[in-house]
Amino acid sequence: MVEMLSEKLEWIDVQYWFYVLNDLSLLYLIIPFFVLELIRYAFLKQLTKDLIFDSIASVLTYGGFLVVGILLGLLAVTKVYFWIHNNFSLPHLELNWVTILTCVLLADFAYYWEHRAMHRIGIGWATHTVHHSSEHFNMSVAYRFGPLDAIMPIIFSIPIVMLGFDPVLVLLSEVFVQVFQTLLHTEIIGKLTKPVEFIFNTPSHHRVHHGSNRQYWDKNYAGILIIWDRMLGTFEPEVEKVKYGISQPINTNNPIIVFFHGISRLFKKMKKVKGFKNKLLVCLKPPDWMPADPK
Amino acid sequence: MKNSTLLFRSLAIIILIAGVAHLVRLGRSYTTGESVSYTTSPIVDEHTNTDFTESDSNSKKILNYNENTDYITGTWLANYKSAEFEGAVLYHLKKEGRVFNAYAMEYQDVHGNSQKAEGHKVLTIKRFDGYKGKGVYKMEYKGKIHNMDCSIDMVDENTFKLSYDYYGYSDVETWKRQ
Ligand SMILES: [Zn+2]
């Protein structure tokens, strides 16, 4: 067993497996699932205009997110990764099953912290609020991204590269976590069996994460494993029926407003507070933070 | 939960997971008898754009045997078709200290006749990241040896393309593992 797990693998094979899991899953899982969700909505007579425009807005923000990602120079980022990997890293790990599994686990743990930061840092929430702004919950919501959503993952995955993991493997693992996460955005699947709900992040746990009910705020940050939330005190089970969305709804499906509403709200808040220090703190403190004396 | 608790639990999780990966790495280099002597690696990834010679001083120490790059060593065959020579040359590529060197071992003509070569060093790969590399390719032309900058592109683990452009004289050779 250990022999098998530590046996050297070929890059070309590993990249192909990730291609099947990460890229092709859009075709064989996500789109069919979304079609199923649409049929369910139609059956429940919930297939409203609002729902359709909400989904369209979500997919359009994904386009915006990709454009920003390219403008930010994700290519330059991979260069930074390689530079760090070659200059500030533990001995490099060879490609085998243990390396892949531990890399996915670390990418998942980094996702947890990155996600938590996105909720608890003003500037993080300014971009991540986009993802939470839909009042529906289906596969298309998973594609709702804010303009700066690509930045946080970069910062949080650099330590993994420094631990000796190949930058390409780190990127593939991160995408894998993201794809797993995508599949949780559904109301079709209820609660799964106890052991699964205990270990893994499930649609039920992630519905809670998208809830605007007060007890559901800032809970269940997990990507693949919910145990991180259980260990770090942010777990909340799904009990009360979830009301999706954010505490201050945006009430629009205009993709431009959806995409930029967090940033514009952050700017408004920065304008409101006095002094440079407070303006900076608005960006760094939790989104509900207000200076003791706002005048 | 206290911030210190969060920090300690998180560090414990990271150390545990990364520790497993590194234990397996050490266990493997122990069982396979790989050298675990640490030496300064010259094989700087070309993506880094760091100048090769300058990076020596600050590059991180890693295992002398690098699984990601050293698979390129071995015997390789390249085919040629030009006015001067039609046939193939067999090369032996080895890691020597900080670089990879290829030596001409045997010439083969189109009729299948082979002739032992003098073992001249023809290629030095100075940087190689497992996918792409840069180096110097020596070519004899009109009795003079020319040192040409060249690049290596792995097509798959058993094939790579060696390309060079020397004062407008450019070519791409395909080297196949034997
Ligand atoms: Zn979130």
Image (tube, rainbow, N blue to C red):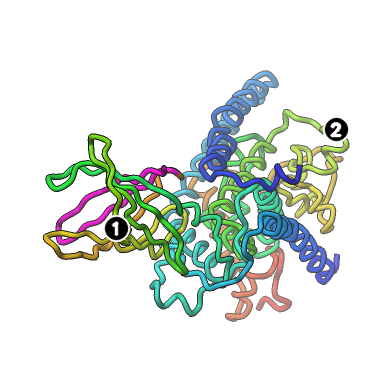
**Which residue range is magenta in the image?**
B158-178
In the displayed structure, A118 sits above or below A178; it is: below
Residue denoted by label 2: A193
Dot label at residue B118:
1
User: What quarter of the picture does the C terminus of chain A occupy?
Assistant: bottom right
x 66%, y 25%: residue: A46
In the displayed structure, A102 sits above or below A201; it is: below
Between residue A284 and residue A200, name the one nearer to us.
A200
Assess whether mark 2 and mark 1 are in contact (beta carbons under 8 angstroms).
no
Q: Is residue A2 left or right of residue B70?
A: right
Q: Quadrant of residue A211?
A: top right
Q: Position of residue A199 (x, y in %)?
A: 82, 44
Q: Is residue A17 left or right of residue B12?
A: left
**Mark 2 residue element:** loop
Quick check: can you spot residue A225? yes
Quick check: can you spot residue A157? no
Q: Is residue B72 left or right of residue A112?
A: left
Chain to which mark 2 belongs: A
Q: Position of residue B128 (x, y in %)?
A: 43, 60
Between residue A244 and residue A250, name the one nearer to us.
A244
**Mark 1 residue element:** loop
Chain to which mark 1 belongs: B
